Amino acid sequence: MIQVGQYNTLKVLRAVDFGVFLDDGKEGILLPKRFVPAGLKPGDEVRVFIYHDSEDRLIATTQEPFGVVGDIVPLKAVSVTKQGAFLDWGLMKDIFVPKSKQLMAMRTGGTYIVKIYIDEQTGRVAATEKIEPFLSNDELTVKEKDVVDLIVYRRTDIGYTVIINGRHTGVLHFNEIYRNIQVGDRTKGFIKAIREENKIDVALGEPGYQRIGGEAGKILDMLQASGGFLPYHDKSDPDDIYAQFAMSKKTFKMALGTLYKQRLINIKEHGIELAKPE
């Protein structure tokens, strides 16, 4: 059965001048010529995304949209009408957000976090900005230290509300942010703590030593780029460390400790240097 708004692997039925038709159990779905991979012939299988064209016909593409049905993604509005807004989702045909599915009137050029769904009346792929009903922390599918996908949802007094794996919400506190972020950003993070009533705190990067390993790698890259020496160490001013490395002094010191234990750096009076191979 064809899944609209999803990827499908379909067999080529026949080739025509303007593309190939793929087997849908009926007359076939067109994969336009511009999207046909070189060498594709009848009998071959191809992975395609299925959606409706402007004439309400099912059509296939090898383009990859920014999200499929069920995903929550940030998308940019490219045009606005009285009926709704059209957002760029990576395909030739933009995705529609009905006016009734908008929190506030969308504007051209704005980026909005939406959920992609199938409209029950038309059967077409559409999007809604009203995503709160799809997010719940009642039954968690994550645990502490899990690495997760995050979407920055909104700014609050204590940090940012984030969407976790497209299912839950959590808080990224200001004291856990060591680089510039903004609403709509997609990034990796981990579950730092699960508190009462399933409230979740998250942090950027990876947990434990893996996280420090990532920061340690950043320091190594900067050392190599600077010729093997940087005028910073565990006694440097926290503001200077943040300005240079975009990390807290605590994280910086832990990263230095990791690198020193692995004999990758030497800590000198005036800074740190790459250790010479033994």
Image: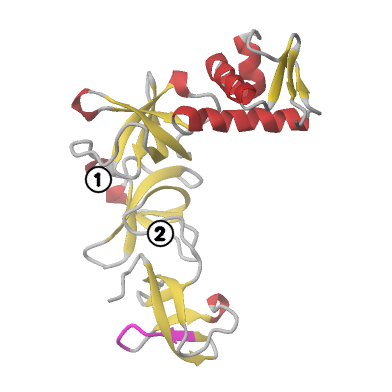
Spot occupied by residue 225 in the image (x, y as percentages of width and height): 76, 32
Element at label 1: helix
Element at label 2: strand
Where residue 11 sits, quadrant-wise, is bottom left
Residue on which disc 2 sits = 95
| Magenta part of the chain | 20-26
Residue 134's disc is 1
For this rendering, which residue is in front, 229 or 205? Answer: 229
Q: Residue at x 22, y 29 (%)?
A: 198
Point out the image quarter for the N terminus: bottom left
Q: Residue at x 60, y 80 (%)?
A: 38
Say few, some or many: other residues with alpha carbon within 10 Å of mark 2 (under 14 / 14 to 19 / 20 or more): many
Res 48 visible: yes
- Tell me if 255 is positioned left or right of 75 in this view: right
Q: Amino acid at mark 2?
A: Ile
- Tell me if 176 is positioned left or right of 98 in this view: right
* Position of 25 relative to 203 (above/below): below
For this rendering, which residue is in front, 275 or 127? Answer: 275
Pair 1/2: label in front: 1
Say few, some or many: other residues with alpha carbon within 10 Å of mark 1 (under 14 / 14 to 19 / 20 or more): few
- Tell me if 79 is positioned left or right of 273 in this view: left
Residue 96's disc is none
For this rendering, which residue is in front, 50 or 42? Answer: 42
Spot occupied by residue 187 in the image (x, y as percentages of width and height): 47, 39
Q: Residue at x 33, y 82 (%)?
A: 24
Asked if the magenta segment contains residue 246, the reply would be: no
